[in-house]
Image: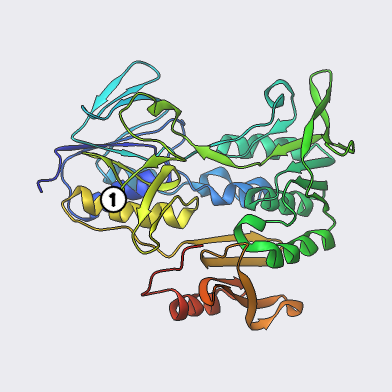
Amino acid sequence: MTPPESILIVGASAAGLSTAEALRRHGYQGRLTMLGAELHAPYDRPPLSKQILAGDWEPARAQLRERAQLDALGADLVLGEPAVALDAATRSVTTASGRVLRAGAVVIATGLTPRRLPGQDGLAGVHGLRGLDDALALRAHLTAAKRLVVVGEGVLGAEIAATARAMGLDVTLAGMGHALLGDQVGDVVGAMLGRLHTARGVRLRLGVAVEGLVGDGGRVTGVRLVTGELLPADAVVVAIGSRPATGWLAGSGLTMDDGVECDARCRAAEGVYAVGDVARWEHEGLGRRLRLENRTNATEQAQVVAANLLGADRAYTPVPYFWTDQYDVKLQAHGLPSPAAEVSVAEGDPEGNRFTAVYREAGQVTGVLGWNMAKQARLLRQEHLAGQAVASA
């Protein structure tokens, strides 16, 4: 296969940049364009809910590469130009300004769009957190606020609650799930995280839905639960999950189903690939379709997409992985630690704030987790998950 003369990457964050760098590293000499919706040069998102929000890092520190490194890529970096349409047959992308970019191949790396609550856009003081500007706006508000309500019990909501509590705010976290990160790590570890937050002073309202936001004079004053309880707030963060940013692909000729549908090579159509949070591909090791929302996946998947663009025939079969830092806890999860799995401690002691756990379904290991034991969790991953198909959850 002859590499395309030009490649257009739609999305200029971690997945897009990693694809561009992998292409150049493997010797690609063709024309390379990265199209980004934001004005910012590529930056890392995990620090937004932690170091950037806390004020421990200046925004520049979240940048993935220095200007000189970006220039060395020899890529045309087009920023502040959201893509609004794709014609997969001609591999042409139209931007919001009406500009049309064509290439021999297109890589879709547009990431996610946060879900919103009804009425959220009409009230000042209600925030989402997806981009750098969101994090800076939220930090500015929290430095003047006293009471924060976080809606959402997933990774992002829990990290924001931990950061805000460390900043000295009065924090309440509400969510429909019965445990923090329950969908990601199950009820056993989720309950441990809940106790960690409670011990640090966060009030939890779990297992109950939000009825709506309450405001006065156009500014949010609280969150009302379906039980009738009102949670007073000077600031509210909505972290109820995200959906793949695929709205601009309507009429493109591609198939959408919880992301851009791809084959095992991350190919959505002839000459069109998807990478990162937006890609839903066939994982041959698991025998199922998968979409992963994390930084590690963005980088690893980009390597495979770049190789396949240059003529390789590589299936993408990672062991899924994610991590989160909350207070003094660093948690790493490998595989698919399903809420339905049985959980057993493999090493350490939960009471000592250091342990590893193994998740099993029908007698087969489906995931491993480390709580302040990253190295030991990696060893468990090697023992149970590497070199074999991860059992389907």
Disc 1 packing (10 Å; few <14; some 14–19; many ≥20) = many
Left or right of 309 on screen, residue 187: right
Q: Quadrant of residue 201?
A: bottom right
Q: Image height check: is 249 above or below 359?
A: above
Please give the name of the residue rendered at 49% of the width and 75% of the height, measured from the top-left corner.
Answer: 378
Hey, which residue is sitting farthest front in the picture? 362
- Position of residue 253 measured from the top left corner of the image (x, y, whole percent): 30, 29
Closer-to-camera residue (158/280): 280
In the picture shown, does residue 171 fall above or below 183?
above
Residue 311 position within the rendered picture, expressed as x and y whole percent measured from the top left: 15, 52
When asked about the image quadrant of residue 235, the answer is top right
Residue drawn 73% across and 54% down? 162
Q: Is residue 349 left or right of residue 195?
A: left
Residue under the image location 47 percent in, 46 percent down: 63
Q: Identify the residue shown where x is 35% and y is 53%.
A: 282
Do we see residue 145 in this rendering? yes
Task: Determine whether 381 is above or below 330 in the image.
Answer: below
Instruction: Please state which amino acid type lies under the numbered disc 1.
Output: Val
Local SS, label 1: helix
Residue hosting label 1: 305
For residue 91, which quarter of the picture? Answer: top left
Along the line of sight, which residue is nearer the eye, 354 or 165? 354
Is residue 371 shown to the viewer in this render? no
Give the x, y percent position of residue 79: 39, 30
